[in-house]
Image (cartoon, rainbow, N blue to C red):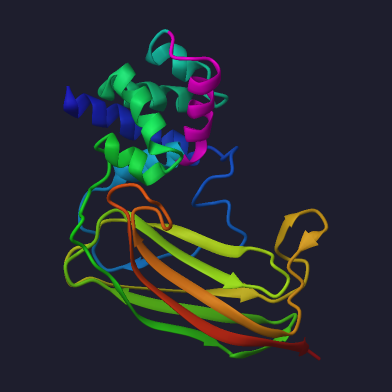
Amino acid sequence: MKLAFFLVLLLLGQNLAAAPSRHHDVFQKKLLPRFALQIESPNADYKYCGLCINFADQFLQNLLNLILNVGVIGGCTDLCGMLPGSNVEKEVCEVLCSVAGFYEFVQIIQEADLDPIYYCELLNQCEIKDDGDATITDLTVKPKLVPRGSTFEISFTFATKNGTGTGEVYLGIDTRDGIPLDSSELLKPLPAGQSVSTDGTVSAEPGRYCIEEGICEEWIPGNYTIVVAVCNGQCGSNHPHSQLYDLKRLSFNITEDAI
């Protein structure tokens, strides 16, 4: 039974991952480009955890709204059938619901309170480790004087002595005009002694990163601060199995337009 569940979930998950997202989710709604964590050797088979979080990112809000507005009636098929997604997404919902049991599934949705990592931990799809750690050992920006309209590179490294639980890596830039520039990635459980690094390029071109039409980052010349955080669970969450492992800040300056 358990093997059959995982096979069904994996097949459905491949289709879910390939489908375009219709929702603003925790790990993809950010304005900055997503960054790839360069992990030497992942700890465990986390594909089901990633699938669960991908589903929760897209549909946890919808499920909670259905429970609050429509009520708890019927069973897994009725609840999941009301989701706005495709048949594949409704089937993933049904599989997760059937394994947990309908009323337990509903209780978990309410308890998770829109936290996709905690939701999947409650469903026993993501590994929990409350004695983990991580330390940011390096954070750099090149160049530190960035002509407006050019690009700059951000890189950082973090290491763990005891291993980590399922969590999040966050990257943000405090801007002068208040436009929220940030990005985040799922942190899969890491074994003790693991080191992780990543880097990426950011454009300082005015009007490139917009929260809506006409409201964009203009890269006003002056001081900016990069913020990097590594967390157990979702960064900023107050739920169990959530904590801030480490946080680092680094300043740089935007200068007048490049010639």
Can you tell which quarter of the image residue 131 is in?
bottom left
**Residue shown at 78% from the left, 89% from the top:** 256
Rendered location of residue 244, percent (x, y): 35, 64
**Residue shown at 56% from the left, 40% from the top:** 21
136, 67: nearer the viewer: 67
**Total number of numbered labels?**
0
Q: Is the residue 30 above or below the residue 10 in the image? A: below
Rendered location of residue 84, percent (x, y): 57, 24
The magenta region covers: 57-73
Q: Is residue 187 visible?
A: no
Can you tell which quarter of the image residue 1 is in?
top left
Q: Is residue 196 left or right of residue 77?
A: left
Q: Is residue 197 magenta?
A: no
Rendered location of residue 207, percent (x, y): 78, 67
Q: Is residue 186 left or right of residue 150?
A: left
**Residue shown at 46% from the left, 64% from the top:** 170
Pick out the residue farthest to the front: 238
Q: Where does the C terminus fall, quadrant-wise?
A: bottom right
Q: Is residue 255 left or right of residue 185?
A: right
Rendered location of residue 106, percent (x, y): 37, 23
Q: Is residue 60 magenta?
A: yes
164, 40: nearer the viewer: 164
Q: Is the residue 96 above or below the residue 150 in the image? A: above
Q: Is residue 135 visible?
A: yes
Can you tell which quarter of the image residue 122 is in?
top left
Which secondary structure type mostly characterizes the magenta part of the structure?
helix
Pick out the residue farthest to the top: 74
**Residue shown at 59% from the left, 90% from the top:** 144
